[in-house]
Amino acid sequence: MTHSTLYHDGAVSFEKASDEQLVRFALDGDEDAFTVLVRRYQRRLTAFLSQLVGDVELARELSQEAFIRAWSALDRFNPKYRFSTWLFRIGHNLGIDHLRRRRLKTVALYRTDRDGDEVELVVEDHTKDPLGHFENTKLASSLKEAIDELRPEYRELVMLRHFGCLSYQEIAEFKEMPLGTVKNKLFRAHTVLRKALVTFL
Amino acid sequence: MTTSCEAIQESLAEHLGETGRLSEEERRHLELCPQCCEVAAGENALGLILARVLPPADPTMEDKVRAAMHSARRRRRVLALLPVAASLLVALLGAVLLGGLPGGSLLALLPVWSSQGWVSLAASAGDWNTVLTTVAGAATALLSPGVLVTAIVVSLLGFGAVAFAARRWRQVSPWHDIG
């Protein structure tokens, strides 16, 4: 396969190329091909990671790092797998590493209330809120709450499906789980979400 | 709810209530099953909410990644050269063991290391038999068999490693030489 298959109006149009084609072009030295992959996945990866780490700005940094790591390791990418699942795995590992480090560093802040009980101080920064771009803040907080209350195994699948926009097949590959299980768990997760968000549906 | 209802509702969840993506049979079921119809409507509405969860794109990310790609490439280029350098070192060690460098005891006997080396080399270039006989004679005269074998093995390993590392370098270089 050559660039000629992607020529459109005298210029190479990478936008229509598949991920596999773009990876091959990137390995042949085409930086633009990799940049298209960055463009294609940055919002999805950021959305997924923002749910994982709870901070959209941090998720952007981690996404950027994931792309750089993917580029650095591109010659080791196994074309047997999809680029999307490989990239999300890199991002996921970065997110988990970050959470582990943060847990080691974090010191909880407490204050004493009128009854003398210790209450944890929660510092909210809405600019970092993964759903901060929602105009309907009530819907955003209900959705966040509904997702947080999902069982962890459901929550991760919802994050991969709706924030990472991965297909069921890609999720099955990512989680090394049978396709039928992914289908069933996501159906159950949706049932919980529908119930939780019934006032907005 | 029947088993087929659950299967259809799983499909509805997968397609976020888009009934157009169901099979003919599933659509027929939907016409007759109010419970599944309700799920279809709910999934559709949920899909509209979930479609808004992606944050806006970061316009600076592409440029930042591109800049990092250049430095990553430079770093990888240096790292890929390390095996070439290491194998050259091994080859050099083999040559030293053979007495060629820097002392010149063995290789000095070859035409290329002598005072009129290049002239002699040109003269003997067509006669490899003479060259090999000279090397073998000098080697057996100057080195014990053990040292000679070790030197030859180290040299061969070294040059083999150079060839391998150079090949590996050629494989990664198209990717690293861009830009």
Image (cartoon, rainbow, N blue to C red):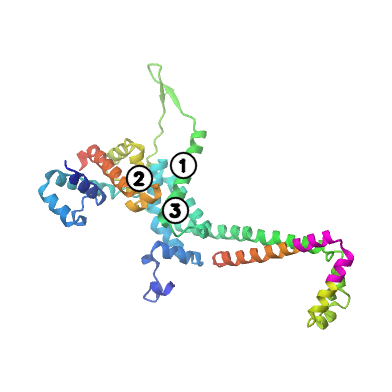
| SS state under label 2 | helix
The dominant secondary structure in magenta is helix
Q: Earlier in the sequence, mark 3 or mark 2?
A: 3
The answer to whether residue B105 shows anywhere in this view is no
Quarter of the view holding residue A9: bottom left
Residue designated by label 1: A96
**Residue A25 counted in the magenta span:** no
Residue designated by label 2: A159
**Label tally:** 3
Amino acid of disc 3: Trp
Amino acid of disc 1: Ile
Crowd tier of the residue under label 3, counting other residues whose Cα lies within 10 Å: few below 14, some 14–19, many 20 or above: some
The answer to whether residue A122 shows anywhere in this view is yes
Crowd tier of the residue under label 2, counting other residues whose Cα lies within 10 Å: few below 14, some 14–19, many 20 or above: many
Label 3 to label 2, Cα distance in Å? 16 Å
| SS state under label 3 | helix
Task: Using the image, name the chain to which the residue with label 2 belongs.
Answer: A
Provide residue B140's location: percent of width, then percent of height: 86, 66
Residue depth check, mark 3 versus mark 1: number of the one nearer the observer: 3
Q: Are marks 3 and 1 on the same chain?
A: yes
> Residue sitting at 43 percent across and 72 percent down?
A3
Q: Earlier in the sequence, mark 1 or mark 2?
A: 1
